[in-house]
Amino acid sequence: MAVTDEAIEKIKGMIVSGALRPGDRLPKESELAADLGLSRNSLREAVRALSLIRILDVRQGDGTYVTSLDPQLLLEALSFVVDFHRDDTVLEFLAVRRILEPAATAMAALRISEQQLDALTAQLDKLGDAPSVEDLVACDLEFHRGIVQSSGNSVLCSLLDGLSGPTTRARIWRGLTQEDAVSRTLREHRAILAALRDRDAEAARSWATVHIASVEQWLRSTL
Amino acid sequence: MAVTDEAIEKIKGMIVSGALRPGDRLPKESELAADLGLSRNSLREAVRALSLIRILDVRQGDGTYVTSLDPQLLLEALSFVVDFHRDDTVLEFLAVRRILEPAATAMAALRISEQQLDALTAQLDKLGDAPSVEDLVACDLEFHRGIVQSSGNSVLCSLLDGLSGPTTRARIWRGLTQEDAVSRTLREHRAILAALRDRDAEAARSWATVHIASVEQWLRSTL
DNA sequence: TCGCTCAAGACCTCCGACGTATCAGGTCAT
DNA sequence: ATGACCTGATACGTCGGAGGTCTTGAGCGA
């Protein structure tokens, strides 16, 4: 195994074992390189790799720190990976969303605050009846994110965030110009919100399923 | 933005845009570095980072290639990330599994082959009635993986694989020594398999839910 | 006390050299 | 002619050192 890979494993080991804890600062590059028995150049490759997936946070002029290791932060790397997928696997990602999103929406129905409900309502009101496709996409993303956050599970939230990432969603919506799709989306958003306000988890779940299934159906007929 | 980060973005761009396709070979380090306008050392940091998340495959003495970009491969990096999570977030990961696994099991009920059913049966038979905890853990992993693969969704499969990764599962099972837990697990596996054989998606879903919920409940009472 | 200057510390980038692994082509024995 | 073996070219792996840039905080003056 290459020295850089060893270094990655060792740093990972230090974090998993608790020798390095979230927020801790690593020894400076030259010291750490000496400790691990490799050159500064090779160590930098290891650090850079761990930095890409948000394990380490490198601040020039300051030092290198272990991130908070929050699920949210680590799964952020997921969206980076999802960006690489080609169109022919979009349906599979969408199928996973179709499983997760209704469940998250149902969970949210039991936990969402009045204040959050009001915010979602205001958001929909602000969008109006005939928004541009761009506005609708942005709003859709925000709407679902708000709901999923109310599920209270940050892993679930980050996962869905990654799966629904800008790229995937943009690709799907770019061609979604059929007139009734816009109004249908607006109606479905209203219905989901109403179900949440009623604390009706099953209704919320069903509307979320319908909502995603309609996108899935449209996409399937298009590809 | 640092030159290395720019290089990462550029390489990503080349792949996403289709200029580089799965399996393609990249120009050699020195050339690519010159093309992108940075030193070989800095480029190597970018390549190493992309290699960690399985976007690139570097072979010494040969060259650097774009991987297949299969969801399976890319989500493999997920397990690396999951390893970093501390015990207090295990419940959130488990909650996500509780959503995905029953759905995957239900999907499998409609698609699994006779041959795969026989293989799962043989696996359970081989384990016997009173296996060691280690054997049970290994078998459990294999059993669920086999089922999820039959769901036909490779994204779903990889995601669950990552979430159920060795570390998380090992941590959970390490303390699972209560006698009835072992026999209960065996019974539940048999029940899931029976539901699959009956092509009864709802029964399969329910048994999978029960199966995971029991782990969740035990874990919740322990932490 | 507040704000500015400046030097120390740490990461950023680059260069050039050498080590090591892989592959292709040629050589030689069978 | 075929196969194993050798060898050179090629490309990645590792290293040490030299400047450069950014952040931080101590020290100074208003």
Image (cartoon, coloured by chain):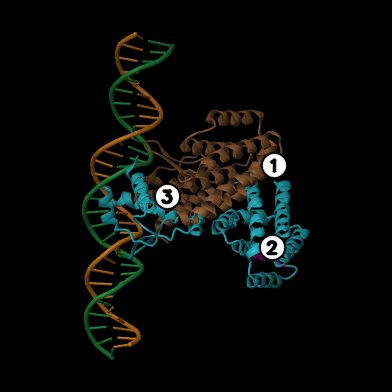
Chain colours: A cyan, B brown, C orange, D green
Which residue extends farthest right?
A180
Residue B36, position as x, y percentages in the image = 42, 52
Instruction: Determine the secondary structure under disc 1.
Output: helix
| Magenta-drawn segment | A131-139
Residue B221 is at least partly visible in this image: yes
Residue A171, position as x, y percentages in the image = 63, 54
- Foreground pick, B126 / B31: B126
Q: Main secondary structure of the magenta part?
A: helix
Subunit bearing disc 2: A
Q: What residue is pinned by disc 2?
A: A133
Query: Relative to D30, is C19 above or below?
Result: above
Q: Is residue B20 magenta?
A: no
Q: Is residue B100 left or right of residue B82?
A: right
Subunit bearing disc 1: B
| Distance (Cα) linking label 1 and label 3 | 44 Å
In this view, the mark in front (3 or 2)? 3
